[in-house]
């Protein structure tokens, strides 16, 4: 069992103790059950699923994302073939980081979404990997992290050993928050440091966080 972290804590992932050739960053969550209103029941309205998405920013030594990928005809960044791994850019061009899929409900046991990072092979140009979670269309659907419980992010090495875990439950303080800077992996000499952050934002888009890293 790895180290369980609290918000603001970190742990050094030593290469001589862990197999960092293929590290899985797993995220999971549950949604609180709540009663449907009488009108909703009569009309048979189904509430929208909570679709939590994880994105990873691959940053340089200055803590910034340097390649934002292609631009469309209007000059807007599309983040395709960029240093951001997310549901529209599932694999980084280096082949050292990829998203395994998109769980749209959080149903089931274990990890709901995973990003795999080959930390031993990640080019030296990348000194930090930032993990952000968003509630897709959270504002439109009236959803927030206040309804999310048993949320966690964990790091597992190539042997399946859990190295670090950060548990974070929802609650009143997250009632108007729809995205979160969950954790960071920071390159150190002969190791990586896993930092538990848990900083929330009212925005339901990870691109708002990306502004701080570009």
Image (tube, rainbow, N blue to C red):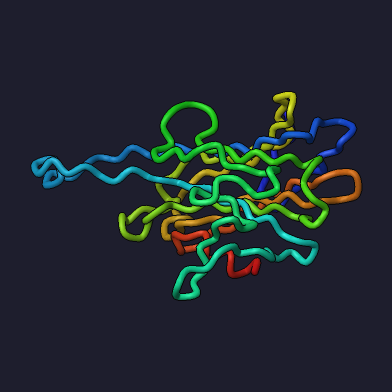
Residue 176, by quadrant, is bottom left
Give left or right: position of 77 versus 5: left
> 137 and 78: which one is in front?
78
Give left or right: position of 41 versus 70: left
Q: In the rendered view, would you say 15 is above or below 133?
A: above
Please report the residue visible at 48 percent of the width from the left and 53 percent of the height from the top. 134
| Total marks placed | 0
Quarter of the image where the N terminus is located: top right
Please report the residue visible at 69 percent of the width from the left and 41 percent of the height from the top. 117
Q: In the rendered view, would you say 130 is above or below 105?
A: below
Residue furthest out toward the bottom: 74
Residue furthest out toward the front: 73
Quarter of the image where the C terminus is located: bottom right
Residue 35: give x, y in percent of width and height. Answer: 25, 40
Residue 68, by quadrant, is bottom right
Give left or right: position of 130 versus 105: right
Residue furthest out toward the left: 42
Residue 178: give x, y in percent of width and height. Answer: 45, 57
Residue 62: give x, y in percent of width and height. Answer: 78, 67
Please report the residue visible at 10 percent of the width from the left and 44 percent of the height from the top. 43
Residue 170: give x, y in percent of width and height. Answer: 48, 47
> 3 and 18: which one is in front?
18
Please report the residue visible at 45 percent of the width from the left and 75 percent of the height from the top. 74
């Amino acid at each position: 069992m790895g180290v369980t972290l609290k918000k603001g804590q970190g742990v050094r992932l030593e290469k001589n103790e862990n197999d960092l050739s293929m590290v899985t960053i797993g995220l999971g969550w549950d949604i609180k059950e709540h009663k449907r209103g009488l009108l909703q029941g009569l009309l048979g309205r189904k509430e929208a699923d909570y679709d939590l998405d994880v994105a990873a920013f691959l940053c340089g030594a200055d803590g910034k994302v340097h390649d934002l990928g292609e631009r469309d005809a209007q000059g807007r960044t599309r983040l395709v073939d960029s240093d951001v791994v997310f549901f529209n850019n599932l694999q980084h061009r280096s082949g050292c980081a990829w998203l395994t899929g998109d769980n749209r409900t959080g149903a089931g046991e274990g990890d709901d979404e995973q990003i795999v990072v080959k930390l031993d092979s990640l080019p030296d140009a990348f000194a930090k990997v930032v993990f952000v979670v968003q509630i897709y269309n959270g504002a439109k659907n009236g959803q927030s992290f206040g309804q999310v419980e048993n949320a966690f992010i964990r790091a597992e090495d190539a042997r399946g050993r859990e190295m670090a875990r950060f548990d974070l439950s929802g609650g009143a303080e997250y009632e108007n928050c729809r995205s979160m800077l969950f954790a960071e992996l920071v390159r150190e000499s002969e190791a990586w440091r896993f930092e538990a952050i848990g900083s929330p934002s009212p925005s339901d888009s990870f691109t708002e966080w990306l502004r701080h890293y570009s």
